[in-house]
Amino acid sequence: MVEYKVLILGDSHIHDRANDIPGEFMDILRSGSYEVVIHAGDLVDPDVLSLVKSLGKRQYIVKGNMDYLDLPWQAVFEVGDVKMGVVHGDQVRPRGNIEALTRIAKTINVNVLVSGHTHAPFITEYKGVIHVNPGSVTGV
Amino acid sequence: MRPSFIEMTIMDNKINIELYELVNNRVLKNLSRAFTVNV
């Protein structure tokens, strides 16, 4: 059996609202040996893109409403037997609307949907979809 | 808001998800959830 380790980040907003990812986190992130790294958007600086790419073997990074980087609006992929999707979440209103996020997950046919935009983390299951929101890695 | 990120471990159809938060300069594992997906 293979175990896959996945890192999920979001809403870094460097340098529009924050300067850096906290050093306390960087020690953990750099020693994580992640198979997959996900960023749920609003990076904002290209340096964050380089950093995220350095943290894992596979990277899935989507565009947030504050991003001007050349990134996709959504990504769909598999990790082991699990189908995963990632969107920033600015497509739904109000922010974090679980019903609307579930409709996105069903449309793209994933078991797990990663989203951001709320800046407040949540982990929940709703109508058979596991929803994961990492909050803001810089706490903005 | 507290700075936060998530680590997820996937083995077959089993998923463990852990939320890390920075509280008073300490990294705390504040929430842990386990799920099984139908594949």
Image (cartoon, coloured by chain):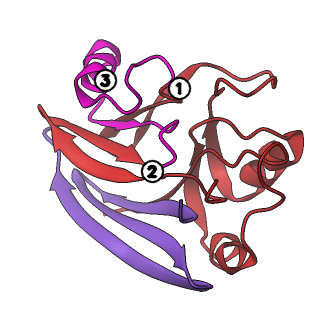
Chain colours: A red, B purple
Distance from label 2 to label 1 (Cα)?
A: 21 Å
Q: Chain of mark 3?
A: A
**What residue is rendered at 77% in x and 56% in y?**
A54
Measuring 66% from the left and 26% from the top, which residue is drawn there?
A63
Tell if the residue under mark 3 belongs to the same chain as the one under mark 2.
Answer: yes
* Residue designated by label 3: A105
Q: Amino acid at mark 1?
A: Ala
The residue marked by circle 2 belongs to what chain? A
Identify residue type, mark 3. Ala
Q: Which residues are magenta?
A: A90-119
Of the image marks 1 and 3, the number of the one nearer the N terminus: 1
Please give the name of the residue rendered at 72% of the width and 28% of the height, measured from the top-left corner: A66
Q: Is residue A14 magenta?
A: no
Q: How many marks?
A: 3
Q: Quadrant of residue A85?
A: top left
Q: Secondary structure at mark 2?
A: loop
